[in-house]
Amino acid sequence: MSDNTFEVKWRIENAISWFETRNDTLYSSQFLAGTLKNTRWKLRLSLNSQLGEKYISFSLQRDIEDDYPQTINLNYELLFIASDGSLLKSKRCTDKFDPKTVSQELNVKQSVILEEEKKAYFAEGVLTVCCQLWKGSNFSYGRSCLIQTVIGKKCIKVNTTIDNLSPPSIMNVNFMPPSTDISLLSLDVYVGSDELIFKRKHVECKSFSWYLCKLFALGSNGEEIGFKERNDLTNQLILNNAEIIQSMPPLDHLIRKGTLSLQLEITYYPGVVSESTRIMF
């Protein structure tokens, strides 16, 4: 067995929510490559575009907190692997690494990972990537570690009512979620003769900005009655577009004594909620 090889596997739970709702880079926790002069590293997953095509990119980064400042000549292989350990895609490279250096990227089309081969890449909702590092021309398995990251996902429902509905008019409705993460979501409502049009007005959110909303009307027995969604209620690109969600007419059976009951379902992703690293021999 070679004494200068190191393999790290990174398993990310709920990774789909990260790629569908965020545009920033996801980093693994730091790991210490004991077979490579105790250098410190991180793995990275990010989104990028090339010639109009969107990709998910996997790369290796030597950490800034490295105690070994010299340049390291290193062979490495980046891999996307299935839950059974079979290879989905890989790339083998040789580079010089100083502290802060980021490796070459292994790129896979976003449509392949999130749509065409979703079951292979996200078996049981977990994405697994692997990086193998070694010096010299010969590779053989040595020490390894397993990093596990969990992306948080929360869903809350909050109800409110609109009183004194009389078309045509413009009204404001506030939802007050019982959450320390979101304290207020405010909508402007256009009340027409056979439709309601909602526009996001204000959101008070402390710790994150990635979330999805789904709006329902509540029937006489509290049943959820879906609205016809024209666009994502919280999409930043259409923030100034007034025609966000339109109700399905008629409204008469939903409005009781001039009052309409609404329910807002908020799904949000507070980022990484847990990480663990286990050294294996």
Image (spheres, rainbow, N blue to C red):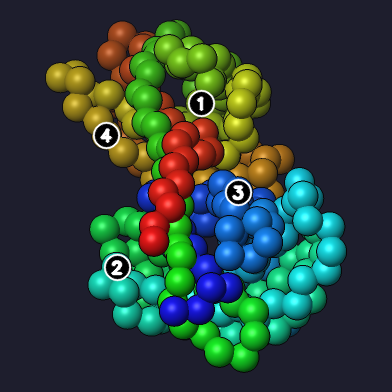
Instruction: Identify the residue shown where x is 45% and y is 57%.
Output: 145
Q: For the residue marked with disc 4, what is the amino acid?
A: Ile
Q: Is residue 179 visible?
A: yes
* Image coords of residue 246 (percent x, y): 46, 40
Secondary structure category for the residue under label 1: strand
State the separation of the CA atoms marked 2 and 4.
39 Å
Give residue 83's mark.
2
Q: Give the residue number, with chain letter if any, for mark 4.
A: 225
Q: For the residue marked with disc 2, what is the amino acid?
A: Ser
Pointer 2 or 4: first along the chain: 2
State the separation of the CA atoms marked 3 and 1.
53 Å
Instruction: Identify the residue shown where x is 39% and y is 32%.
Output: 154
Pointer 3 or 1: first along the chain: 3
Secondary structure category for the residue under label 4: strand
Q: How many marks?
A: 4
Q: Is 96 left or right of 273, judged from the image as shown? A: right
**Mark 2, mark 1: which one is toward the viewer?**
2
Q: Give the residue number, with chain letter if any, for mark 3.
A: 30
Q: Give the residue number, with chain letter if any, for mark 1.
A: 191
* Image coords of residue 71 (percent x, y): 83, 69
Instruction: Identify the residue shown where x is 26% and y is 72%.
Output: 84
